[in-house]
Image (cartoon, rainbow, N blue to C red):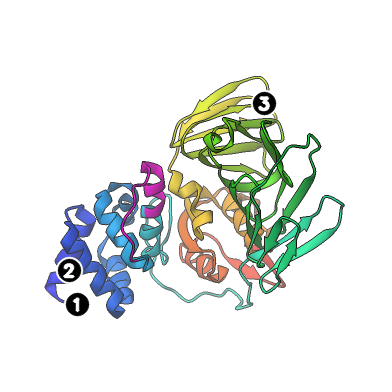
Amino acid sequence: MNKRIKNLIAKYFDEHLINEEAKELVNWIENGNFKIFNEYVMINFSIDEIETLKLGADIEIWKNISEKINHKGKKAVKLSYWKFAAIAASIAISITLSFVFNKDNSVFKNTSSKITKQPIVPGSNKAVLTLENGDHVTLEKGKVYHLSNRTSNGEKLVYNADESSSKEVQYNYLTIPRGGQFYVQLADGTKVWLNSESKLKYPLSFVKGATRKVELLYGEAYFNVSNSSNHNGVNFIVETKIQEVNVLGTEFNIKAYNDENEILTTLVEGEVSVSNGIVNKVLKPGNQSRVNIIKDNVSINKVNVANEIAWKNEFFNFENQLLEDMLQTLSRWYDVKIVYEDDEKKNLKFSGVLKRTSNINELLESIEKTGRVKFEITNKKIIIK
């Protein structure tokens, strides 16, 4: 690596890289030098510096880099601050995949791992569609499905635009198993990404002039709601357990798993109101509401949106998170069982990132290098020692 490239990387982390220099650096990275870039960054820059990139760099530079890396080759479009932040985070994550660190932000060098090399396959696009007549249809890669106003290529399910004048509403259900994910576009144009172990109830078609309403029965989903201006001002409601989210047209993420006591709603763009039937709160971009199911209270906090929606962008992004919570998230995607031989290990905190397409051993081995925990994999069961 020559001195010029080293200087550009340093300016990149100092946030002094101008647009032409960004192009030069990206061209060098794309010209077969990504591995060299990654290794150099790991050796010469701290975790804190890498994490800063998520929100700190100039927007035009990030647009340029995101276009180049993703090979879109299209003119940059204007993005809201938080949508941009998510893109920026994805790029930052792409150069930090080898890092896992504890609460002291220590970086640990490679050591031999004793994790059994048993293959644990990452999740994939798959779902079960329950039709209005109760029939079940398996959706998965390689299977084409078409009926009435809906079509699936095995990776997504799309309903034709339709607003029924009938007052009778018929519902479909989309169930995502452990180790699965799926995308569905509803009849009003609303786009929904569903994470592992999730279930969505929604109308086959929406009644013209009536409130558009769906129900996230459990799990996690990212919504990009078709604007109310396209539907005569009719709003959109997402019901989840004891929570109701009311929107006009926006993007947000809801996490409401059955084995968790809180419902988390993270607003990416626009404005929504969140209610538990007792308290009503309005969220602004960057806000996350926490609805406690047991205590019936609602709190609002500022969060790193990019971290919260990393799953939609094909990453896991854990930041100073309890090992128990981290492994619970991974267990849904990799469809594995988690067993603790020592319950005290649940409270250890780690941070790290991982592509959802990666082998889970990659992350577990990195955690093992901290010397604080050991793993054993047997028949899709991860034992924590």
The residue beneath circle 1 is 1
Please state which amino acid type lies under the numbered disc 3.
Answer: Lys
133 displayed left or right of 192: right
Nearest to the observer: residue 44 or residue 157: 157
**Residue identified by numbered label 3:** 295
Question: Which circle's residue, 2 or 1, is located before the other in the chain?
Answer: 1
Looking at the rendering, the stretch of residues picked out in magenta corresponds to: 73-87
The CA span between labels 1 and 3 is 57 Å
Report whether residue 28 is seen: yes
Residue 342 percent across, percent down from the top left: 65, 55
The quarter of the picture where the N terminus appears is bottom left
Mark positioned earlier in the residue sequence (3 or 2): 2
Magenta run includes residue 285: no
- Examine the rendering and report whether any part of residue 338 can be seen: no
Q: Which residue is mark 2?
A: 6
Where residue 278 appears, x then y in whole percent?
66, 19
Q: Quadrant of residue 177?
A: bottom right
Q: Spatial distance from mark 2 to mark 1, Cα to Cα?
A: 7 Å
Q: Amino acid at mark 1?
A: Met
